[in-house]
Image (cartoon, rainbow, N blue to C red):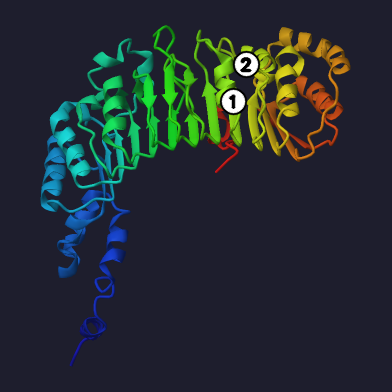
Amino acid sequence: MDTPSGKRAKALDAAGDRISGLPDEVRHHVLSFLPARDAARTCVLSPRWRHLWASALRLNVDTKGFTSQAAFVKFVTALLLSRGCTPLDSFCLDANGPDIYLNDFYDTASLWICHALRSNVQTLSITDHDRNDAFEEINDFEDDPDAFHIEHCPFTSSYLKRLHLCGVLILNCFLKNLFSGCPALEDLDMTNCAIIGTKFSSGTLKNLSIDFDNFPDCQGYGYEDIVINMPSLVSLHIGALLGALPSLEDVQSLRTASICLDVQGAAFSDACDILGALSNVKNLELLFLCGVNGKYSLGSDMHLCQVSFTNLTALSISDWCLHDNCKSLLYMLEHSPNLEELTLKIMEPNSRKEDEWSCSISAREKTVTAFNCEKLKKVEIICPRGDRRVGKLVTILLAKIIFAPEISIKPISGLPWYQYSDKKWTVWS
């Protein structure tokens, strides 16, 4: 007589292995969510899974779970050798775990990257140790023994479309090789990277993002401004730079721009060029902390250059626009006929400057003619709790905008606005 467990086994045999019966593309999709080490372990599930992991279209290789560098290198090398010439859709190399640095086995890591490029990878992600904390301790990033020097990797591929870099060293030679050797590249994302290169020139790139998890303290490094010459660029996000400012040349296709800077002692060399380059955008975020010299010159240069923002529908701006009695803010409102949403992010005030600003409001109100912002439906003011400037600001807006929009005030406390709510303020998706 069959036991209950034996009956269940027979029933399973009769029904078949449903997971193994799935199409290969579905099982490959399942493997794409697993780290490469776990994906390799699926070989014991059934004969149909035995070699599937070696032909996965997406590889996620990370150092988590490896107790030594030697074990990690051995596993990844064997994994890539077992694949042969199987094409890759995406390759993610994450070495942000403890005690394993890509630069310690630079030649081998470079071979891995070359293998991915030769496998026609379309999405490539390389993450080394988070360098954000090291910026306060290192004076010359080129001599940092732990930073992954990616410039010697031969980036040549007609298939690579998306590249994400985190915690690596970026030099001009790498940028030149990347943009000339990868003609299909459209998306470039750099997070917590030591960007010493200054020449960003590409005819194909559509999305560029440069950011840090926290604003690094990089005073006195004297880096040159980053020159961006990308006629096909549609989206630009600059969250922080190492002692440099952006210089926008040909960005004629730009529609979404977010620039958030806190570069101590840096100054805009020509604000007119920046404003002119941003004049066609649809979504704009201009956030400057108090350490940026020349931020107030943006306001005066707006009037000098007579810049208009005819396509602008969403604007997010910090309290630099309140300088000179809201001169910059009022100018942008008056010269943005299609603006629908406005977000103002105000930092903790200096009490003396706040009083001066408040005392001169009445004079300003008498000299500025009301203007039409009929499409402006929503104004959100994010500010420190109890900030006295907000009442005056609302008074000006209601007095100068013919069709008054809905105005909401979101007081915050404990954190500066640039750290509040994990950057959820970005006004576009």
Give me the disc on residue 396.
none
Give me the disc on residue 298.
2
Above or below, 214 relative to 408: above
Taking the spot 30% from the left edge, 54% from the top edge, the residue there is 32
**Residue 353 placed where, x, y %?**
72, 9
Residue 62 figure quarter: top left
Residue 76 figure quarter: top left
Quadrant in which the C terminus is drawn: top right
Taking the spot 34% from the left edge, 19% from the top edge, the residue there is 197
Q: Which residue is mark 1?
A: 286
**Residue 377 placed where, x, y %?**
76, 40
Quadrant in which the N terminus is drawn: bottom left
Amino acid of disc 1: Leu
- Near mark 1 (Cα within 10 A), the count class, few <14, some 14-19 or many ≥20, is some
Give the SS element for disc 2: helix
Taking the spot 64% from the left edge, 14% from the top edge, the residue there is 301
Taking the spot 50% from the left edge, 10% from the top edge, the residue there is 266
**Residue 170 placed where, x, y %?**
31, 23
Decide if residue 402 is in sight here: yes
Q: Earlier in the sequence, mark 2 or mark 1?
A: 1
